Image (cartoon, rainbow, N blue to C red):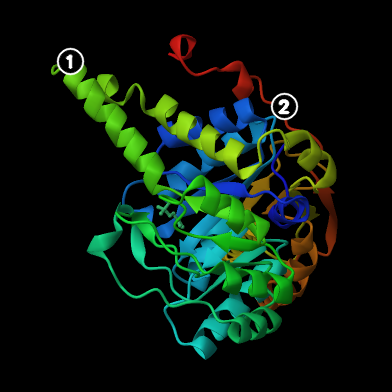
Amino acid sequence: MPLVDMKDMLQHAYDHGYAVGAFDLVSLDFLEGIMSAAEKARAPVILSLAESHFEYFDFELAMPAVEAAARRASVPVAIHLDHGASLESAVRAIRLGCNGVMVDASHADFSENIRISRAVTDMAHACGITVEGELGYVPGVEGEDAERHPGEVAYTTLAEARAYVERTGVDCLAVSIGTVHGRMKGKPKLDYQRLKQINEALGIPLVIHGGTGLSDDQFRRLINNGVAKINYFTALSDAAGASIRASAREDRGNAYTGLVKGVREAVAAEVESRMRLWGSAGRAAEVLSRCRAWTPVEHLIVYNVEGADETRVEMMMEEGRRVLGAIPGVREVLTGRAVQAQAKYRYTWLVRFCHPAVIDSYRDHPDHVAFADKLFRPIAGDRISIDYRIVETVFSVRHHDRTLGAGSA
Ligand code: 13P
């Protein structure tokens, strides 16, 4: 089960002087390309999903595939919400399977950024989830020409970085030191001195957004100054676009499948070269042995009711699914009835938590307390419950059995 705790993964990179790539994916081809590169390079990897890209794919439909790719991998994987728009976005992303979140309030003024980031951190940490904050402003739009969205780089200042991390409790910090999102014409000038000072003062993994277009030397210097996560998208999108254009030239009659057939390989090649450059290649085994595995927990109750007819039980279950399903860290709420009429217990709740931390935060959450005290416990005195870890999930086809290229169709 190589989904691993993202904080542990980033700490390992930070402590050992390399950076993990956080590659934004926008399709199954991207997902397969990124995972294939990670397997080949034996590298830890972050599968990143940017809210600004949700217009290109259905986040809710994509996440089961992303999670399955992570779980069947043999290299360590984390799943991250990139540039989330709100606290609600983060709660939703956690419900769908992300184990790291970023809510980007860097456009807001300093105190508002702190307020929003603090709320996200409080919620996410109660669910065992890693949080990335951003301070300063990295202009541009992923996948587009940076010159079309010039905006001013707002540099992260040392004093604000210190106060922000102290007051929000974020686990890693995205800093603005001269990079821009998207495609660049010139070479960006990076402020290494600023980065060095921030790194020395904070001592936590730093994140660079707008990885596309930086030189090998620039990447090395960033990593030497505390950058442990590099966000990367536009170059993948460009490689995919170039592959599609080449397929169109090769055969003007190519339809969809013919046009996209080389996209996975093109994405994989770009990702693999980054993993080798950023030093994450060859680290998979170490990371797997040092980082906590990401293991979900389930909360199961079997019970009988007294003093309530079937209609009231049905209403109670419906209300429970609605209320409990919205509590942060809850991934799913299933209610059930026994199949056999003579069963010792007649009803069940199965509540899926993203992480063991949710056992406590769920139990104490005011919505759970109110539901349990008012609607459930008064009629369900006869019950037993257990919280248990999922011990093992076996996938019949492992990703590295499916090599890209001639045999992959
Ligand atoms: P690029 O598109 O410039 O690689 O930046 C990606 C990014 O920062 C996503 O958050």
Q: Residue at x 73, y 61 (%)?
A: 128
- Asked if disc 2 and disc 1 are in contact, CB closer than 8 Å, the reply is no
Q: Is residue 50 left or right of residue 129?
A: left
| Amino acid bearing label 1 | Asp
**Residue 97 visible, this orientation:** no
How far apart in space, not on screen, are marks 2 and 1 (Cα)?
41 Å
**Residue 185 visible, this orientation:** yes
Determine whether 37 is above or below 63 in the image. above
Q: Quadrant of ligand 1?
A: bottom left
In the image, residue 249 lies at what x, y percent? 17, 21
| Amino acid bearing label 2 | Val
Q: Is residue 20 left or right of residue 146?
A: right
Residue 14 occupies which quadrant of the picture? bottom right
Q: Residue at x 26, y 61 (%)?
A: 147
Q: Nearer the viewer, residue 13 or 101?
A: 13
The residue that disc 2 covers is 394
Which mark is in front, 2 or 1?
Answer: 1
- Label 2, secondary structure: give it: loop
Q: Nearer the viewer, residue 164 or 254?
A: 164
